[in-house]
Image (cartoon, coloured by chain):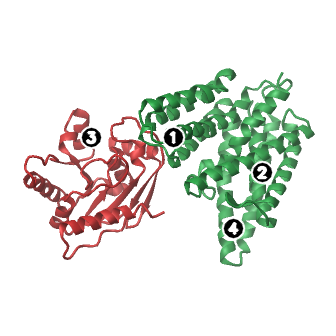
Chain colours: A green, B red
Amino acid sequence: MSIATDTTLFRLLSGVLGLLVLSSAIGWALSRRVANESTRATVDNINARIRAWWVMALVFMASVSTGALGSILLFTLISFLALREFVTLAPTGPGDHRALFWCFFVATPLEYFLIWIGWYGLFSILIPVYISIFVAVRTVLAGDTERFLERTATTQWGLMICVYFVSYVPALLMLRIPGYEHQNAALIFFLVLVVQLSDVLQYIWGKSIGRRRVAPSISPNKTWEGFVGGILSATAIGAALWWATPFGPAQAALMAFVVTVMGFAGGLIMSAIKRDRGIKDYGSLIEGHGGVLDRIDSLCFAAPVFFHMTRFFFTA
Amino acid sequence: MIATTLAVVSRLVSGATVQWHCDPRSDGQRIYFANHSSHLDFILIWSALPACLRQSVRPVAGKDYWEKGPVRRFLAGRVFHAVLIERRTAGSCDGLTPARAAIQRMADEIGDRHSLIVFPEGTRGLNGEVGAFKSGLYHLSRLRPDAELIPVHLENLNRILPKGEILPVPMLSRVVFGPSLAASVDEDKDGFLARARNALIQLREIQ
């Protein structure tokens, strides 16, 4: 499937580009009418975020539109960068060095290679079963028992979140959905678009009418108003995109609802880890957003659920 | 060429953020002193320097280690133009003669053009803590009072490539160049070394 021959993909791409142009225009208008210093900082941050969105969206669209290889390579890179951010702040020690080396250079490429060759059976158990056992064995062989459980669990969970969960996004290409052959790239678009727009919409709703905080001890910026407004509007967008998916309008709305709620949970979980480690962002790679893991936290927890729901209800 | 390639690769592997709290492009001669925990230390500091300065900055390294085998000898001599010194000070209890000779060589080798990168702990530490400084930095600063002393703090490199490992784990790291150490007027050796070590450790707190 490629952009030149596919009208669904072409319409999705045009829609995203239109959104980016619109947000840049709004960002520009906002910066023209800033009154005081504190609003200035917020508007500058919004504009930095919009600039970063341009880059992220263009890289994402270029990779996904170029077929399976582009998608798989992009998400391999994302996993690699995310795992790097995760391990950097995780409390691992010298005894974990060899196990971590295997995680980065063997487990991560292998997981994505299995998607490339379409071996679903091994793909779905590689990290939860084999690599998890391997990590425990390799770590115990290093002989350091200090905080052994914590260190092993950290490495295993880092792999689950950054590699296993993320790999479910390109894994959508493996699904054989009757009547939807060779169109799976649009499913990746649907998932990523709905989850990321839900983040943006929660931010916008929260900034404009947010009052009551959902979890003040974890994330002071998340409000009930932002949560409800963001989830409902992202669900509406998901429903409106039903023509790009194998779902009907109501099914698309339900799917969008589930992935946005999962995404919200993912954001909270990843914030709790950051709180525990005493940091604000996982990294500084993406201007205005923080690190890669800050941007994909919601996607990590939405992708596996979206994949398995689609697989259970829609594949033959 | 080889040096630049190695620098780029180590920058990628170590995902380093570089922070400057002094002028990166100063023309003056400098002695950069850093905490030592990994083989990546020198190359990372070197790659963080502006390209125009790299040719004139030389690392100080232990002769016993870097003269073993053709690869190490080539890297130290031809690629990085290291100033190789005798580390072995055992034998006499103060070890004054070879150590002093080494310091004198460092001071001479940089002439009026080069800068130095030194690791005053003398060897790589194990757990990421900054060990006690050996007296070399003090004597060097006495011989070359004209050179600026710049503390450089390296963070997380002991986790990326710990002592005894060959393969790196690509975590993120940070290189902080501190403000230059104020010249001492009347200060004894221990006072100076403590002050230099504190200046280095304090860079860890800067966010």
- Amino acid at the residue labelled 1: Arg
Query: Do the residues bearing badges 2 and 1 touch, measured as CB atoms within 8 Å?
Result: no
User: The residue tagged with tag 1: helix, strand or loop?
Assistant: helix
Residue identified by numbered label 4: A43
Q: Do labels 2 and 1 share a chain?
A: yes
Nearer the observer, A263 or A167: A263
Describe the element under mark 2 as helix, strand or loop. Answer: helix
Residue A138: where, in percent of width, then height? 47, 29
- The residue depicted at 10 percent of the width and 52 percent of the height is B95
Indicate the position of residue A307 as horizontal and vertical percent values. Answer: 76, 33
Q: Which of marks 2 and 3 is in front?
A: 2
**Residue tagged by mark 3?**
B75
Question: On what subunit does the disc labeled 1 rest?
Answer: A
Image mark for residue B3: none
Q: Relative to A242, is B88 on the left or the right? A: left
Q: Name the residue under label 2.
A: A198
Chain under numbered label 2: A
Labels 3 & 1 near each other (Cβ < 8 A): no
Q: Residues within 10 Å of mark 2 (few under 14, many from 20)?
A: many
For marks 1 and 4, give the CA distance: 41 Å
**Which residue is at the front of the view, B205 or A116?**
B205
Q: Which of marks 2 and 4 is in front?
A: 2
Chain letter of disc 4 in the image: A
Judged left or right of residue A50, residue B70 is left
Quadrant in the picture for residue B73: top left
Q: Earlier in the sequence, mark 1 or mark 4?
A: 4
* Residue found at x 11% / y 56%: B100
Q: Nearer the viewer, residue A109 or A144?
A: A144
Residue under label 1, please give it: A151
